[in-house]
Image (tube, rainbow, N blue to C red):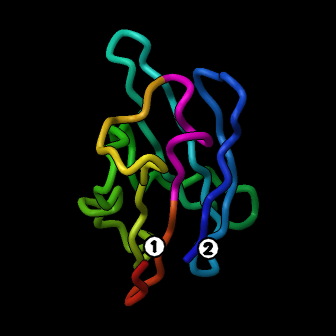
């Protein structure tokens, strides 16, 4: 299991780079203030400064759902990407919840909590 670090500062959008199963990815998080919800984009980073390859775009962050469930690209990580709440609720993350109440986890294929 890998805990993906999230910044705790109050930013409406941020991008980070992480390695999952030996492949580098960018994760871009965007907050929609109207619905007070977060979306995530996941893109695989190719070699030789190629443009990132989109895997998931505009996926709304829901607590407990596999964020990779509908991804079908061959570079999709084989495991499960989950947002989980530290207080046990299924309440969607609000503007200041990422990195504090809500954390992102990656479980390799076959791993469980």
Does the segment drawn in magenta span residue 39? no
Q: How crowded is mark 2: few (under 14 residues within 10 Å), some or many (20 or more)?
A: few
Disc number placed over residue 92 in the picture, else none: none
In the picture, residue 91 is in which quadrant? top left
13 lies left or right of 67: right
Disc 2 target residue:
23
Q: Position of residue 11 (x, y in %)?
A: 65, 23
Q: Which of 72 and 83 is in front in this view?
A: 83
Range drawn in magenta: 95-104
Toward the front, the furthest residue is 87
> Is tag 1's residue or tag 2's residue first in the polypeptide sequence?
2
Q: Nearer the viewer, residue 87 or 69?
A: 87
Q: Where is residue 55 in the image (x, y as percent from the top left)?
A: 41, 56
Q: Are marks 1 and 2 in contact (CB under 8 Å)?
A: yes
Disc number placed over residue 77 in the picture, else none: 1
Toward the right, the furthest residue is 48
Q: Describe the element under mark 2 as helix, strand or loop.
A: strand
Toward the bottom, the furthest residue is 110
Report the number of discs: 2
112 lies left or right of 48: left
Q: Residues within 10 Å of mark 1 (few under 14, many from 20)?
A: many
Residue in the picture at 28% in, 66% down = 72
Toward the top, the furthest residue is 34
Q: In this view, does 22 lie above or below 41?
A: below
Q: Position of residue 67 (x, y in %)?
A: 35, 56
**Quarter of the N terminus within the rendering:** bottom right
Residue in the picture at 63% in, 60% down = 45
Q: Main secondary structure of the magenta part?
A: loop
């Amino acid at each position: 299991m890998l805990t993906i670090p999230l910044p705790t500062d109050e930013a409406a959008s941020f991008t980070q780079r992480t390695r999952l199963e030996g492949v580098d990815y960018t994760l871009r998080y965007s907050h929609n203030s109207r619905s007070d919800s977060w979306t995530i984009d996941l893109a695989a980073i190719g070699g030789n400064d190629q443009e990132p390859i989109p895997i998931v775009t505009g996926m709304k962050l829901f607590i407990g759902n596999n964020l990779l469930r509908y991804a079908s690209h061959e570079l999709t990580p084989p495991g499960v990407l989950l947002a989980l709440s530290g207080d046990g609720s299924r309440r969607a993350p609000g503007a200041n919840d990422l990195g504090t109440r809500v954390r992102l986890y990656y479980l390799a294929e076959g791993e469980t909590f």
